[in-house]
Amino acid sequence: MFLINRFIKIIFCLFIFTSFASGISFAKDAVGGLEDISGKVNVLRAEWKNSVKQGFLIREKDIIYVGENSKATLVFRDGSSMRLFPNTKLILKKSRDENLDHRIITYIFILEYGSFWGNYILGEQKTIIKTSSADIWINEANILVTHAKNGMGIRLSSGKVKIVNDDESILLKPGYFISGINKSGDFSNKIKKITNILQITSSDKKLTYQQIGDRRLISFSFQLEKIKSKSNINISGDVYVTASSKKFKFPKVKLNKRGYARVVAVLEPFGINENSSSQIEVKAVMEGKEFIETGMGMNVINISRK
């Protein structure tokens, strides 16, 4: 029996290795893959619970545990993503393929506890987040969700979401947040405006490639500030940055005590057959549920080929 169990464990470990060794390559039954992992992240699948690494593929009924001081990003086929923050338990309850006029996949998650930032792209998916406090229906949105014993919190920077508990259903508008949503009782009176924002500025707003294979370095500055007064906020913290093109490579971003950071990002070369005439959106959020009043920052870089 010992030898059989050992053999099974070896096979499972080989499966994990092949999932992340060459980056995320989606299998037919995989809904997404884990990227940008730091710290300890475990996945429970059937009777197995294992620590996973970059590129691990997530399937229906998987349970993701993000440990203390740990983080991970779940990336979907369409480019949508969920940045999972420390002390989070997320269950992929179901993925449903709906063949309407065009393919739509509905994902149903259960957030047992913890928090995440979701960057959902309009088009190929709908997402339902279920908690013991309320449910969230998402089509396209940039949203922070937190859930604990004292209720659920939501911050919406852009897009559309519907929030439903036993007594009320509302559509939350961009630029607002709610704290303390419970299973019963009205919560529309708890809606407040986002008071802070993470501003992003770049050294270049428009780039023209002179020839194939050009590699560019672009400086980005990040500053926490109050929306109304435009005054700086002196708080340090980690920043999560994502771009609409995989060509952008960012180093780790951490604000100093003045709420400021400056980094140099790399824009990798475009290939001969790649379309480099486009806009690349760079989005950044403060990492952690404590920043529920701080909205997402965004910067657009225009790319063209001469």
Image (cartoon, grey):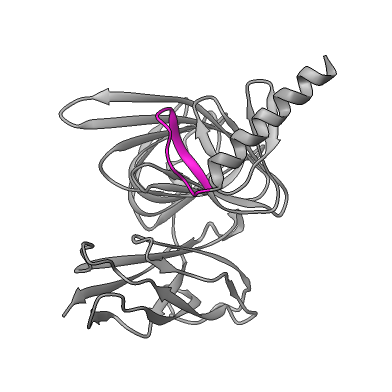
From this view, report whether residue 286 is shown above or below residue 164. below
Q: Residue 205, how many percent across, how many down? A: 29, 80
> What quarter of the picture does the C terminus occupy?
bottom left
Which picture quadrant has residue 139? Answer: top left
Q: For residue 30: magenta? A: yes
Given residues 35 and 125, the one toward you in this image is: 35
Given residues 266 and 13, the one toward you in this image is: 13
Q: For residue 227: magenta? A: no
From this view, report whether residue 7 is shown above or below residue 169. above
Q: Is residue 143 left or right of residue 304?
A: right
Q: Residue 50, how many percent across, how many down? A: 69, 35
Residue lying furthest top: 1
Q: Is residue 6 left or right of residue 49?
A: right
Given residues 237 and 107, the one toward you in this image is: 107
Which picture quadrant has residue 16? Answer: top right
> What quarter of the picture does the N terminus occupy?
top right
Q: Residue at x 54, y 40 (%)?
A: 19
Report if residue 88 is visible in the image: yes
Q: Residue 82, how many percent across, how many down? A: 48, 47
Report if residue 180 is visible in the image: no
Q: Which range of residues does the magenta coloring cover?
A: 22-34
From this view, report whether residue 106 is shown above or below residue 174. above
Q: Residue 281, how many percent across, how many down? A: 32, 65
Given residues 268 and 144, the one toward you in this image is: 268
Which picture quadrant has residue 248? Answer: bottom left
